[in-house]
């Protein structure tokens, strides 16, 4: 089925028109790749990347909705093989009741395995476990130049170019994932509140290693010294022995989050400066100063926003951008300056997310690098926003850092090669599997990724 | 490609020697714009517009010869502009136009030329550009209209009527393009001090090419079908448009 229409990323900016196709079988997918013309083709998962990575103006967008089967869990090795269109949500529901959990989960479960590989996604456990592709043992890649079976030990150049390669090496049709064993569907969570950025960062440096999962939410909207006050949540999967008797029931696929929906008709700008500021204030005040050992359902801990369907529509018709950057451990000052800049210019950001990264994956385009990452949700509209983000780009680039392409919708193109100095390795892999340059996205066109 | 803020990386300017267009190009090149294609009739003025764009930061500037009196030739000019861009075209800016005055208002040949350069040629060119952008899957067409077309006045009614037509055409086309990823935005400047108005007495709320360009750039970040420059003219013309004819006639200018 071919369906023409407009597509955007999760941020709902820069819509472009393409024909979406959903191949019913692998053979249809092969035929698509073999008959592709020069108008461009790219894979699209759940469209949870914020910018223009999963769209291709005037070309073809391939969705793997029908290639989403999840195989049996190999209980000996703790691995599972699934098709590229399987969502992490489905995967989690399947594996959890058998006592297994995905090795990495981003802030939403509504992503596909293919999309998660293409962005080499990270989770709250990056400081310990690295990003997703470190736990991928094998991939099948469908490219214009053929079918490629790759893995860390088999054609590693192509494997790692695909990990974070934003779909530009081909379509991941299958992947084998190493799972982690869990004993329950609950998390043991410690929450701590900090009045400023320095103290939360110090606490993270000192104590993150004691937890598998850690992330801080930072308020960037308060003026002056209060900018940077944070709530740090850290946790681990609860062991059976940590559960009170009444909750120590058998594992189900209970993920547990609220089901809310954003009403269809919205006021013009529901999430704007004042409402965002008020929200951040309320959220900070609601958090306990210190609460340790709390049991939380998985969903609430990992994917607090998944309970609100279509929450991205809350930003109104102009949409929003997410700006996420990473800098090395010696450049914590960039985090401080970024928070300061937003607060000073009164650019509203809805709950910024701060996290410590462990060492990066070997992929040339993989985003995470040892140090700090800060992610900011910023509604489009304030006239000072575009130039302010350009300034942040410069700061980040000068510190040897980079921005996350899965979130990007506006990076200065000349900085791509600075932030991703190994991007020629992606280009080399692409020439090999896609000699005619048929794979293209709006992102690759905008940033000149060849 | 257009980024999240509607900032282009490439632009085709029809009327590439226009003062307002030059100010727009300056600003866009200070941001993301690197490819600029200028269509115009005068080689000397085109060359200086090219140099100005290069100074502003463009690294690929091309010139395309065109004569707006050759209405049938408009689609071909647009095709040559797209080819010269050598890739995606993010924005097409239409800055073509000839002002009419009292001195030759009964000269049929002059009226024909004003109508051709201000209305017919832009209509043909924009139609072609819309088709090219639709195939491309996205793009923004910015049409410099004028408040002169909002309520047509005695002083320049030939020009004003052409702008009224162009403005209505652009709004209609914008609706027709819904769902294609392509949009048309009408910009309605008031009196702007440029070579087009040199020697004329300035009207109230007179502004500069730079100020209009600021509005054009800001407009790229929105989906608003109409942008006024300066913005206050929206209110002013909201009133003027409803003024009885007798009162409107007595207004100065
Ligand atoms: C609320 C929210 C929270 C998030 N939190 C995190 C987080 O904590 N950590 C993190 O890393 N990311 C996070 N993200 C980003 C998200 O995980 C990535 O953008 C992910 O790539 C989205 O997957 P998707 O299936 O929606 O892919 P899409 O957004 O549809 O596509 C993303 C990229 O993957 C490519 N792609 C899709 N499917 C395939 C395939 N089968 N084969 C090859 N390439 C493919 C596309 O071409 C595109 O380049 C978050 C996003 C949201 C909305
Ligand atoms: N200035 C104002 O007060 C004002 C107000 C509202 C709207 N506008 C509109 O804004 C646009 C730009 O105007 P401007 O103020 O920047 O004036 P301008 O510099 O005179 O621009 C007009 C452009 O049209 C071109 N042109 C006219 N006839 C042509 C023909 N036969 N063939 C090829 N090109 C032709 C001009 O080329 P040459 O350089 O070769 O002459 C010039 O590039 C116009 O559409 C105008 O109507 C202007």
Image (spheres, rainbow, N blue to C red):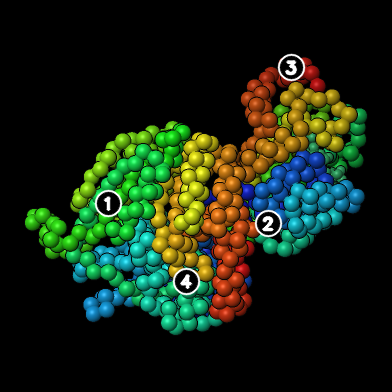
Residue B41 visible: no
Whether callout 4 and callout 3 share a subunit is answered no
Q: Mark 3 points at which residue?
A: B246
Q: In this view, does A415 lie above or below A166?
A: above
Using a 10 Å C-alpha cutoff, classify the residue at mark 4 as few (fewer than 14 neighbours), some (14 to 19) or many (20 or more): some
Disc 3, SS: helix
Q: Do the residues labelled 3 and 1 touch (CB within 8 Å)?
A: no
Q: Which of marks 4 and 2 is in front?
A: 4
Disc 4, SS: loop
Disc 1, SS: helix
* Residue A300 - label: 1
- In-image side of A94 versus A230 (left or right): left
Of A136 and B25, the residue lying toward us: A136
Label 4 and label 3: CA atoms lie apart by: 77 Å
| Residue at 50% over, 45% down | A338
Disc 2, SS: loop
Q: Mark 1 lies on which chain?
A: A
Q: Mark 2 lies on which chain?
A: B
Q: Are marks 2 and 3 in contact (CB under 8 Å)?
A: no
Residue at the left extreme of this rendering: A245
**Does any atom of ligand 2 lie closer than 8 Å to the CB of label 2?**
no
Q: Mark 2 points at which residue?
A: B89
What percent of the width, then of the height, locates residue A275? Answer: 41, 34
Image quadrant of ligand 1?
Answer: bottom left
- In-image side of B203 versus A193 (left or right): right
Q: In this view, does B1 lie above or below A42?
A: above
| Residue at 68% over, 38% down | B214
Q: Which of marks 4 and 1 is nearer the N terminus?
A: 1
Q: Which of marks 2 and 3 is nearer the N terminus?
A: 2
**Does any atom of ligand 1 lie closer than 8 Å to the CB of label 4?**
no
Q: Mark 4 points at which residue?
A: A362
What percent of the width, then of the height, locates residue A403? Answer: 52, 56
């Amino acid at each position: 089925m071919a369906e023409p229409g407009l597509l955007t990323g999760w941020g709902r900016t820069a819509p472009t028109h393409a024909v979406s196709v959903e191949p019913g079988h692998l053979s249809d997918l092969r035929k698509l790749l073999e008959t592709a013309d020069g108008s461009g083709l790219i894979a699209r998962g759940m469209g949870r990347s914020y910018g223009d990575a999963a769209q291709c103006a005037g070309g073809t967008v391939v969705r793997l909705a029908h290639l989403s089967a999840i195989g049996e869990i190999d209980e000996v090795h703790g691995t599972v093989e699934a098709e590229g269109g399987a969502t992490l949500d489905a995967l989690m529901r399947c594996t959890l009741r058998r006592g297994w959990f995905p090795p990495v989960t981003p802030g939403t479960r509504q992503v596909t395995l293919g999309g998660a590989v293409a962005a080499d996604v990270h989770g709250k456990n990056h400081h310990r476990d690295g990003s997703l592709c470190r736990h991928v043992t094998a991939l099948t890649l469908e490219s214009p130049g053929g079918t490629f079976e790759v893995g860390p030990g088999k054609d590693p150049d192509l494997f790692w170019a695909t990990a974070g390669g934003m779909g530009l090496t081909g379509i991941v049709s299958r992947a084998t994932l190493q799972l982690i064993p869990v004993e329950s569907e609950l998390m043991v969570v410690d929450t701590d509140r900090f009045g400023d950025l320095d103290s939360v960062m110090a606490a993270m440096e000192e104590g993150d290693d004691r937890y598998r999962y850690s992330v801080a939410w930072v308020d960037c909207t308060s003026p002056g010294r209060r900018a940077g006050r944070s709530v740090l949540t850290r946790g681990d999967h609860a062991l059976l022995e940590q559960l009170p008797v009444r909750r120590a029931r058998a594992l189900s696929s209970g993920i547990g989050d609220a089901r809310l929906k954003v009403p269809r008709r919205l006021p013009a700008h529901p999430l704007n400066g004042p409402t965002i500021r008020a929200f951040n204030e309320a959220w900070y005040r609601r958090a306990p100063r210190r609460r340790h050992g709390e049991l939380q359902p998985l969903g609430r801990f990992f994917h607090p926003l998944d309970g609100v369907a279509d929450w991205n529509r809350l930003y109104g018709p102009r949409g929003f951008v997410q700006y996420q950057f990473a800098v090395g451990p010696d450049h914590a000052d960039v985090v401080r300056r970024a928070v300061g800049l937003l607060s000073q210019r009164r650019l509203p950001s809805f709950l910024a997310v701060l996290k410590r990264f462990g060492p990066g994956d070997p992929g040339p385009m993989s985003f995470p690098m040892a140090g700090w990452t800060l992610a900011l949700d910023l509604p489009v509209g304030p006239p000072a926003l575009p130039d302010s983000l350009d300034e942040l780009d410069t700061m980040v680039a000068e510190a040897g850092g980079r921005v996350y392409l899965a979130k990007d919708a506006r990076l200065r193109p000349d900085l791509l090669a600075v932030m991703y100095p190994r991007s020629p390795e992606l280009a080399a892999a692409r020439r090999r599997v896609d000699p005619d340059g048929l794979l293209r996205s709006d992102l690759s066109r905008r940033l000149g990724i060849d | 490609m257009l980024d999240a803020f509607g900032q282009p990386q490439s632009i085709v300017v029809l009327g590439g020697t226009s003062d307002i267009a030059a100010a727009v190009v300056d600003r866009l090149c200070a941001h993301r714009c690197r490819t600029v294609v200028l269509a115009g009739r005068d080689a000397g003025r085109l060359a200086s517009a090219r140099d100005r764009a290069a100074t502003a930061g463009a690294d690929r500037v091309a010139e395309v010869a065109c004569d707006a009196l050759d209405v049938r030739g408009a689609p071909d000019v647009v095709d040559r502009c797209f080819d010269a861009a050598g890739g995606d075209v993010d924005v097409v800016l239409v800055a073509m136009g000839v002002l009419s005055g009292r001195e030759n208002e009964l000269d049929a040949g002059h009226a024909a030329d004003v109508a051709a350069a201000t209305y017919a040629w832009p209509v043909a060119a924009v139609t072609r550009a819309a088709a090219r952008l639709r195939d491309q899957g996205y793009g923004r067409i910015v049409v410099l209209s004028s408040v002169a077309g909002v309520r047509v006045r005695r002083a320049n009614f030939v020009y004003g009527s052409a702008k009224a037509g162009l403005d209505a055409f652009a709004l209609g086309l914008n609706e027709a393009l819904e769902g294609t990823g392509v949009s048309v935005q009408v910009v309605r400047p008031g009196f702007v001090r440029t070579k087009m108005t040199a020697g004329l007495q300035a009207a109230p709320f007179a502004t500069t090419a730079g100020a209009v360009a600021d509005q054009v750039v800001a407009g790229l970040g929105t989906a608003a079908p109409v942008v006024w420059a300066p913005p206050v003219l929206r209110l002013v013309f909201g009133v003027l448009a409803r003024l009885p004819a007798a009162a409107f006639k007595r207004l100065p200018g």
